[in-house]
C-alpha cells in the first residue's frame, strides 16, 4: 500500500503538538486536526492573474484568522499566499478561500481538539 506524500506529511505535522504551527501547501481541499492554541498556516498558489481574497470566510469561532502574506519562492505563474490562523476553541470551522480570478475556490475543514 502506498501512502500519498501529502498525507504522510499531514499525519506527521498533526502529531507535532500545539507548540508548533501546522503548515499545509497546495490548492486542494483538506480536513485538518489541530490543538487549541496551535497556529495553522495554509499556503495557496495561484496560476495566472488574481489572488485569494483576504480575509477568507471562516464558519465558526473555533478558528481565528490572524493575517496573510505573499511568500516565496516567487514564480512567473502567480503568487503564493500564506494565511495564518489560530485554533481558538474546541469545535470545527470551514475556511473558504475565494479567488479573484479563475482559480478554484478552496474549502478546508479544521477540527480543533
Image: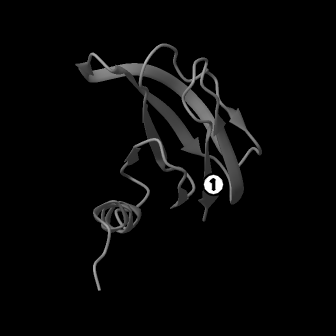
- Residue under the point 38% across and 52% down: 19
Based on the displayed image, in which of its 4 quarters is residue 1 positioned?
bottom left
- Residue under the point 57% across and 24% down: 102
Q: Nearer the viewer, residue 49 or 5?
A: 49
Extreme-bottom residue of the structure = 1
Q: Position of residue 4 (x, y in %)?
A: 32, 68
Local secondary structure at mark 1: strand
Q: Nearer the viewer, residue 85 or 76?
A: 76
Q: How many marks?
A: 1
Pick the quarter of the image with the C terminus.
bottom right
Task: Give the colour scheme of this rendering.
Answer: one colour
Q: Nearer the viewer, residue 54 or 99?
A: 99
- Residue under the point 57% across and 56% down: 36
Q: Position of residue 9 (x, y in %)?
A: 31, 61
**In screen coordinates, is 109 left or right of 21?**
right
Q: Residues within 10 Å of mark 1 (few under 14, many from 20)?
A: some
Q: Position of residue 44 (x, y in %)?
A: 44, 34
**In screen coordinates, is 93 left or right of 37?**
right
- Residue under the point 61% across and 32% down: 65
Extreme-left residue of the structure = 73
Q: Is residue 82 above or below residue 69?
A: below
> Which residue bears the numbered disc 1?
109
Q: Nearer the viewer, residue 56 or 99?
A: 99
Q: Position of residue 26 (x, y in %)?
A: 41, 43
Extreme-right residue of the structure = 60
**In screen coordinates, is 74 left or right of 48?**
left
Amino acid at each position: 500500500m502506498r501512502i500519498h506524500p501529502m498525507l504522510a506529511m499531514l499525519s506527521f505535522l498533526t502529531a507535532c503538538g500545539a507548540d508548533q504551527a501546522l503548515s499545509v501547501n497546495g490548492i486542494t481541499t483538506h480536513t485538518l486536526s489541530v490543538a487549541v492554541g496551535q497556529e495553522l498556516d495554509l499556503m495557496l498558489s495561484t496560476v495566472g492573474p488574481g489572488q485569494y481574497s483576504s480575509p477568507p470566510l471562516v464558519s465558526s469561532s473555533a478558528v481565528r484568522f490572524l493575517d496573510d502574506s505573499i511568500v516565496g519562492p516567487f514564480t512567473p505563474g502567480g503568487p503564493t499566499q500564506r494565511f495564518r490562523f489560530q485554533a481558538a476553541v474546541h469545535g470545527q470551522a470551514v475556511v473558504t478561500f475565494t479567488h479573484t480570478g479563475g482559480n478554484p475556490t478552496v474549502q478546508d475543514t479544521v477540527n480543533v481538539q
